[in-house]
Amino acid sequence: MTHLSLRHLSAAILTGLACLAQPTQAATEQEKASSAILLQGFHWHSWNYNYGWYSTLASKAADMQDLGITHVWFPPPSDAASNEGYLPRQLNVLDSKYGSESALRNTISTLNGKGIKSVVDVVINHRVGTANWADFTNPAWGCNAVSRGDEWSGACGNNDSGGGYDAARDLDHSQTQVQSDLKAWVGNRLKNIGFSGIRYDYSKGYGPQYAKLYHDAMAPNFCVGEIWTDLNYDDVNAHRKVLMNYVDGTGGTCGAFDFTTKGLLTKVLQNGDYWRLKDSSGKPAGGIGWWGQKMVTFVDNHDTGPSENCGIGQNHWAIPCGQVMEGYAYVLTHPGIPSVYYAHVYDWNLRNNIKSLIDIRKTAGITSTSPIAIQAAQNGLYAAIVNGNSGQVAMKIGPGSWSPGTGWSLATSGPNYAVWTKGNSGSNCSVTANFSIANANTANGQSVHVVGNQTALGDWTPTDSFKLTAQGSGANVTWSGSKPLPCNSAIQYKYVKYNGSAAIWESNQLNSSGNREFTTGSSGSVVNRADGNFKF
């Protein structure tokens, strides 16, 4: 399969890109240039804590806040036939091997008090019966809830909308009762105990349109699906296209774990073939190279890697244990929303090393959509420079030697990785940006605003955006204005027509973010953005 440029991506992907260009006041992390950091708040053996895992998480709330965590991914909360929770039984019973419903509520509340949101692991591809194959209770369903062709001979539902799962009954999401009960479970039961984000398990098992259906029932601020399929290292485009199709199938409302990047990191760190991390267009070869805003990156999780130490756990697709920090040096400096693994932070004693990287990311203002320029990708070496909103970061992984040159400060390093910083992140460093746009066809009461990824541009919120001034009268007059912006920052923005309550966003640009982009320079410089016509 030949490389697909953004101009030649499928219509489905381009449709999905439209979603990212129109964030709203209630935008999820997947609908903006996100600075979120997700912590997977469990490992494969976390259930084996005498029903005390939730209390363990609560005890670390202050430390998670200090670490820079914004969201914590919880294990499946419902009663289940498996210790780990991935064979759900009674969905509405929220007592599990991890702890009681009361302890769960208290932990979510404790995290919320530290400004940390809670993401629930939603397992809805499959379910087991209360005592037998499919005697579903709480909520109760009949045989039509099970997809035709399931291992249970009594299944009488419609064909499965995704891949099968042998260990439990595959659910038929086309059934009205299944939809109604799952919307109530996600949108009421789980939301009412404090969850405000969704992680979909085994997302390849059912149509992504159903993920959107249940997403809409909760209206979460974070949504990500697990699309884990085999990776052909000689055709990574096919693999990341599957991720794009999933995101597009949810209407752009949910992101996806970047299993392409994960697989490439595992392969590269095992064999030293770092050249695999750069695609033929010069961009990152994983999902972040196509649609960073929708990708959640990670080094390992409860399935792919070890748990409390290198020798135990699932280990299905693990990074070599001695090279885990190389993986974090990559994901915590690159676009996408990075996820860190509880076991690595608290069991492997990597907490301080990981915090150094998170601090660098936050200080530089790196987000899910930050521009990246790969400097080297060859056997034994990968290096890149990433432009954040308030500084630049240079990084390298691999045994090969590389330096970004003069003017950079080494910020952190370890075996086979190093990270440097450059740029003034202070509030006194500013650049003047002159914006102008014409032919917006404004109606009576509308004005034209600039909305973007900076506080000065409203952080993608129209009510806080920068209002331009009309240079004359008429529907298609030029609107312009000047605004101070931070130095050395990657700016993304769009023009909107706004009447004080409703915003009409211009359509996408043909680039990976879908937004207008530029990078500011040194203190006192001026950037002229004569952007021509409002893009319909």
Image (cartoon, rainbow, N blue to C red):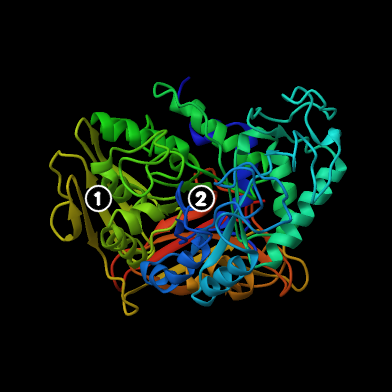
Query: In the figure, is residue 9 to the left or right of 521?
Result: right
**Identity, as a three-letter code, of the amino acid under mark 2:** Gln
From this viewpoint, is residue 479 visible? Answer: no
Outermost bottom residue: 428
Which is nearer the eye, 428 or 199?
A: 199
Query: In the figure, is residue 198 to the left or right of 156?
Result: left
Which is nearer the eye, 133 or 486?
A: 133
Query: In the figure, is residue 81 to the left or right of 129?
Result: left
Give the residue drawn at x 76%, y 50%: 182
Q: Is residue 329 above or below residue 202?
A: below
The residue singled out by tag 2 in the image is 293
Query: In the figure, is residue 19 to the left or right of 264?
Result: right
Q: Secondary structure at mark 1?
A: strand
Which is nearer the eye, 101 or 345?
A: 101
Q: Is residue 361 above or below residue 10?
A: below
Tell me how far mark 2 sits from mark 1, CA to CA. 21 Å
The residue singled out by tag 1 in the image is 395
Residue 285 position by quadrant:
top left
Residues packed near mark 2 inside 10 Å, few (<14), some (14 to 19) or many (20 plus): many
Which is nearer the eye, 468 or 151?
A: 151
Give the residue drawn at x 69%, y 72%: 473
Percent from the top left, x then y, of residue 272? 23, 31
Percent from the top left, x then y, of residue 175? 84, 39
From this viewpoint, is residue 23 visible? Answer: yes
**Identity, as a three-letter code, of the amino acid under mark 1:** Met
